[in-house]
Image (cartoon, helix red, strand yellow):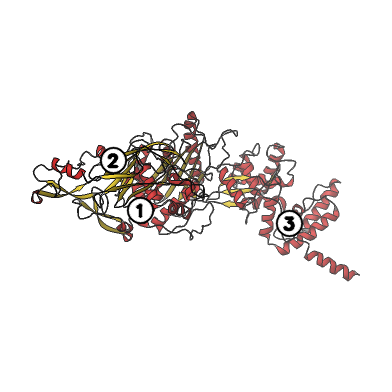
């Protein structure tokens, strides 16, 4: 029987410890890159309890061992000397004044949730304490105690106590502060900062005196420690990145201590910049904003400010605007520019048309309501003109661009390309500031380091291998165009900062003035900014250039200036002749051509379509042809000719543009006999636009013929330029209900028009 009891007792002893000593919920703690506290959320049980650290700071370890267990490294969980001393003291005072517990025994008691004190319970603690010593090292046992000991109020563990009572990590505590915390677990419900101040001070000073007497503190350090004041009450924990904390909890980091790439000092500066800027915008009832700063080289987020800070819920300050989908405005234009370069549709100097245009029921307008006729693609990007980019999207392919955006990491395009239509490039879709930052940082990384590393909130690199890389040369050309951002119709303090360093940047404004965007890129940083109202309310003046650009450059002022610009990726570039007037690859008729280094993909662009060989009478310099002029009297010359609708706006901004000479009078009559005829629609026709089987609105085919083969006809609907046809003159249109005028003009300048009415669909 005795043997059986011994065996059962041995079995119990072996298995008396659970596999995991503590299952208490812990606070979610977010640290910056240097281990400084950014924010924390209380544990589920209402306690401030940080996750256990691997080690205990020297000062606190010295204090706690001297106060609680001087023989900690000599015993095996139970101190016979300590128990004997407690028995004598309790007998002398005729009550329990000392328990004789070692730190190991206190760990056991904490683990068992502080059961009622009895002799049986004490013997049980002693037995389990010895078992604890066999399984864990002294270092681990001390760490268990430091992480789970009560420190008064609802503060558990050394690290939580250090922040709650002294506002810093335990590794930075002074001797007096370490001594204060060392005496708290002895009676956490009786004394703690803010309660029984004099008793706490006396206990701390006795411990400091003890440390002085054994030589840990010299006389000077001892006197300085005694002079330190006790904290009067628990301090609020820092909440410098509350939206980042909430996001990490949502992403499954609840109860963990997370080290991020955030730089606390930069985070505080960015918060202050946003707050100051927000106070100015509030006069216009604009209340929210968000800023994210990311390192190009590491992909780590250095500052994450998800919103402005306001008391009360009326301004929606709790919303993390970094991950909230918002209307994109024109912030996606650089992605289309880069894609069109890569596809060989344009080179940086290619003329893009900027005239009133009509695409079915969609008639885009420039922000200024003015038109250039035509301008180089890089200027269209730097000036963020709408019509050239809608036309470019139409040429590149809506479905193709929709897929391109999704493949690069835009996660909010949950509907089909047809749903967004060509307005996709002007803000017809919603995007997240986080996604925009991710794509732009990937472009910068590929250009700077030849790899797409991605973006991360923690010190863990993300796998970006699934993202198809872009052409380095096309990225470089896009960034170069973005350094020339020009807003002659705007004014603001951002212009002062913009010249401080070279930055590729882009702004965006959504329809209805609901969202203002600004993105800036250097070889070292990407700064992404959004400003608006979280509830979506639009406000006059809420534009990217006025509301977001000043923030962008204020943040760049706080960052170290990049000591270099992106290296030109010459291996991915080629030297080609560019027509000076049209920006296309120079053809035989281009008299003025410049050698330009452009992305190799631009070799696929078309030859200049705007230079024509015209025939002039050498005396009058009027246009002629062989039917009305002696061939020996004809002068053949190349001429830069834009379609009439384009020429109308282009020549206003280009005084040196030469319009085509008039025809010689004798030739004009003959040429007019060869004019065009509009076949469909007939004059004053009433048209019903068909509805397709799938319920979508169909298109009506309009048709014309021209007696001269190979001549181009330029189509306009209600003064909006639609495009050109050659050989086969047909165009499918979807005009809205009402009266319209279709105007056709050939390249000789002859026009015909017809009025018609759409009466239903």
Lower sequence index among marks 3 and 2: 3
**Residue found at x 46% / y 54%:** 403
Q: CA distance from mark 3 to mark 2?
A: 99 Å
Task: For residue 323, say whether it is visible.
Answer: yes
Relative side of 459 to 558, left or right: right
Crowd around label 3: few <14 · some 14–19 · many ≥20 (10 Å): many
Please name which of the two marks, 1 or 3, marks the residue nearer to the observer: 1
Dot label at residue 104: 3
Q: Position of residue 531 (x, y in %)?
A: 48, 38
Q: Nearer the viewer, residue 123 or 598?
A: 598
User: Could you tell me if the residues under marks 3 and 2 are in contact, i.e. CB atoms within 8 Å?
Assistant: no
The extreme top residue here reads: 283
**Residue on which the image places disc 1:** 476
The residue beneath circle 2 is 752
Q: Quadrant of residue 360?
A: top left
Image quadrant of residue 310?
Answer: top right
| 539, above or below 416, in the image | above
Question: Where's residue 393, x and y in %?
Answer: 39, 49
């Amino acid at each position: 029987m005795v043997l059986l009891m011994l065996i059962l007792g041995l079995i119990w002893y072996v298995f008396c410890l659970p596999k995991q000593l503590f299952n208490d919920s812990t606070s979610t703690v977010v640290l910056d890159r240097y281990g400084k506290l950014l924010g924390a959320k209380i544990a589920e049980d209402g306690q401030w309890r940080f996750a256990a650290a691997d080690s205990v700071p020297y000062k606190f370890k010295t204090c706690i061992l001297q106060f609680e267990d001087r023989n900690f490294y000599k015993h095996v969980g139970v101190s016979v000397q300590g128990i004997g001393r407690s028995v004598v003291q309790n007998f002398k005072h005729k009550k329990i004044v000392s328990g004789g517990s070692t730190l190991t025994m206190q760990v056991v008691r904490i683990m068992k949730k502080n059961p009622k004190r009895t002799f049986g319970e004490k013997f049980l603690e002693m037995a389990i304490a010895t078992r604890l010593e066999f399984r864990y090292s002294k270092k681990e046992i001390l760490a268990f105690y430091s992480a789970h000991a009560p420190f008064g109020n609802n503060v558990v563990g050394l690290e939580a106590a250090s922040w709650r009572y002294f506002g810093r990590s335990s590794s930075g505590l002074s001797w007096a502060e370490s001594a204060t915390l060392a005496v708290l677990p002895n009676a956490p419900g009786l004394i703690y900062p803010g309660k029984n101040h004099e008793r706490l001070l006396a206990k701390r000073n006795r411990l400091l005196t003890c440390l002085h007497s054994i030589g840990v503190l010299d006389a000077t350090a001892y006197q300085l420690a005694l002079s330190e004041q006790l904290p009067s009450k628990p301090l609020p924990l820092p909440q410098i990145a509350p939206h980042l904390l909430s996001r990490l909890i949502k992403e499954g980091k609840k109860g963990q201590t997370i080290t991020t790439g955030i730089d606390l000092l930069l985070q505080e500066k960015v918060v202050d910049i946003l707050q100051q800027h927000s106070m100015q915008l509030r006069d216009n009832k604009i209340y929210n904003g968000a800023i994210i700063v990311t390192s190009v080289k590491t992909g780590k987020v250095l500052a994450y400010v998800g919103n402005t800070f306001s008391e009360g819920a009326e301004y929606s300050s709790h919303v993390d605007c970094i991950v909230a989908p918002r209307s994109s405005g024109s912030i996606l234009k650089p992605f289309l520019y880069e894609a069109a370069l890569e596809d060989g549709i344009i080179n940086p100097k290619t003329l893009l048309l900027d005239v009133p245009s009509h695409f079915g029921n969609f008639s885009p307008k420039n922000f200024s309501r003015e038109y250039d006729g035509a301008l180089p693609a890089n200027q269209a990007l730097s000036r963020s003109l709408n019509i050239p980019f809608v036309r470019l999207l139409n040429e590149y392919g809506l479905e193709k661009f929709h897929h391109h955006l999704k493949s690069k990491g835009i996660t909010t395009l949950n509907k089909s390309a047809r749903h967004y239509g060509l307005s996709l490039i002007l803000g017809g879709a919603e995007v997240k500031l986080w996604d925009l930052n991710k794509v732009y940082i990937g472009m910068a990384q590929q250009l700077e380091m030849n790899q797409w590393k991605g973006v991360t909130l923690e010190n863990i690199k993300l796998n970006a291998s699934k993202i198809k890389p872009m052409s380095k040369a096309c990225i470089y050309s896009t960034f170069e165009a973005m350094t020339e951002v020009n807003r002659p119709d705007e004014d603001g303090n951002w212009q002062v900062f913009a010249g401080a360093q070279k930055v590729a940047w882009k702004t965006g404004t959504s329809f209805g003035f609901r969202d203002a965007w600004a993105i800036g890129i250097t070889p070292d940083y990407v700064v992404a900014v959004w400003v608006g109202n979280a509830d979506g309310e639009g406000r006059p003046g809420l534009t990217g250039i006025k509301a977001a650009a000043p923030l962008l450059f204020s943040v760049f002022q706080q960052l170290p200036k990049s000591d270099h610009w992106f290296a030109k990726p010459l291996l991915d570039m080629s030297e080609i002749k560019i027509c000076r007037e049209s920006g296309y690859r120079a053809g035989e008729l281009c008299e003025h051509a410049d050698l330009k280094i452009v992305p190799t993909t631009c070799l696929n662009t078309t030859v200049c379509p705007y230079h024509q060989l015209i025939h002039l009478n050498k005396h009058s310099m009027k246009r002629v042809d062989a039917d009305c002029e002696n061939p020996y009297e004809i002068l053949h010359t190349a001429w830069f000719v834009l379609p009439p609708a384009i020429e109308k706006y282009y020549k206003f901004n280009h005084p040196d543009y030469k319009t085509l000479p008039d025809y010689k009078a004798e030739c004009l009559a003959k040429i007019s006999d060869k004019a065009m005829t509009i076949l469909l629609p007939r004059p004053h026709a009433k048209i019903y636009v068909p509805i397709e089987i799938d319920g979508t609105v169909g298109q009506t085919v309009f048709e014309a013929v021209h007696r001269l083969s190979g001549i181009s006809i330029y189509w306009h609907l209600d003064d909006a330029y639609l495009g050109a046809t050659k050989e086969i003159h047909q165009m499918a249109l979807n005009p809205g209900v009402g009266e319209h005028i279709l105007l056709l003009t050939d390249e000789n300048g002859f026009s015909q028009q017809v009025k018609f009415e759409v009466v239903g669909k």
